[in-house]
Amino acid sequence: MTSKSILIAGTVVLAGAVGAAGMYVAMSNDHGMMGHHGGAMMQHDETNMPGLRGENASAQESADLAVMFNNFATITREVENLPNGIRTVTRASDPAVMDALVNHSVGMIDRVGQLDDPKILIQSPTLDIFFLRGAEIISEVSVEDEGLVVIQTSADPQIVKALQTHAAEVTEMAERGMQAVHEMMMANGESH
């Protein structure tokens, strides 16, 4: 495979295998779920995943997220914290999941650059700073033989911390799926 590179100044890839890349999907056993931004209660629905929908998200964006969450076991990630950001390598053994991963990541680059929050019903609060201050982030994205490689940097220590926090959140979701999501939401004091 030849390397395909994209350099985008002033944007960030949400670079997660399930990223929404760092987006949270909250699933509860029998009680429903509550969104971080939306705050609306809805029934637990692991098939249709309504928590992946958003006020400003397209049907395709939600579908890509569902593919990644439904197939998280096919995803692996490596994260290196840099002094001014992160370097991640994310791959999926299933080609359809890899396509969804790349589509999602590139789409989020564009959204952050435009300060265009998708307002997913359940979304990590870590993402807020990206949609407010995306111009302060530089991302390099390439699809390599090793997977989707993302390098994100910023001169602002607050953004660097958020990049590193979000990368760790996404890794947890890639490794443990919905269980990690549930635990993160509980740690953030969100109802489920």
Image (spheres, grey):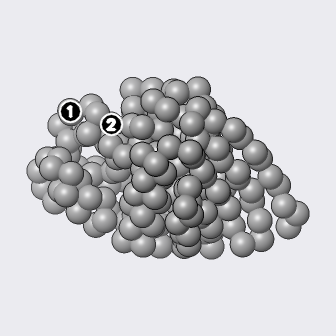
Frontmost residue, 11 versus 84: 84
In the image, what residue occupies the spot 33% across and 50% down?
Answer: 25
Percent across and percent down for residue 117 are 46, 30
The amino acid type, in three-letter code, at marker 1 is Ala
User: Which residue is under mark 2?
Assistant: 121
Residue extending furthest right? 2
Frontmost residue, 83 versus 7: 83
For residue 117, say whether it is visible.
Answer: no
Residue extending furthest left? 31
Percent across and percent down for residue 51 are 33, 43
Q: Are marks 1 and 2 in contact (CB under 8 Å)?
A: yes
Q: Name the image quarter holding residue 4.
A: bottom right
User: Which residue is under mark 1?
Assistant: 40
- Judged left or right of residue 46, residue 96 is right
The 10 Å Cα crowd at callout 1, few under 14, some 14 to 19, many 20 or more, is few
Tag on residue 90? none
Percent across and percent down for residue 89 are 62, 67
- Judged left or right of residue 30, residue 7 is right
In the image, what residue occupies the spot 75% across and 59% down?
Answer: 143
- Judged left or right of residue 5, residue 156 is left
Q: Secondary structure at mark 2?
A: loop
For residue 25, say whether it is visible.
Answer: yes
Vertical arrangement, residue 182 with respect to residue 91, above or below: above
Frontmost residue, 127 versus 32: 127
The amino acid type, in three-letter code, at marker 2 is Leu
Percent across and percent down for residue 10 are 63, 36
Q: Secondary structure at mark 1?
A: loop
In the image, what residue occupies the spot 17% across and 37% down?
Answer: 41
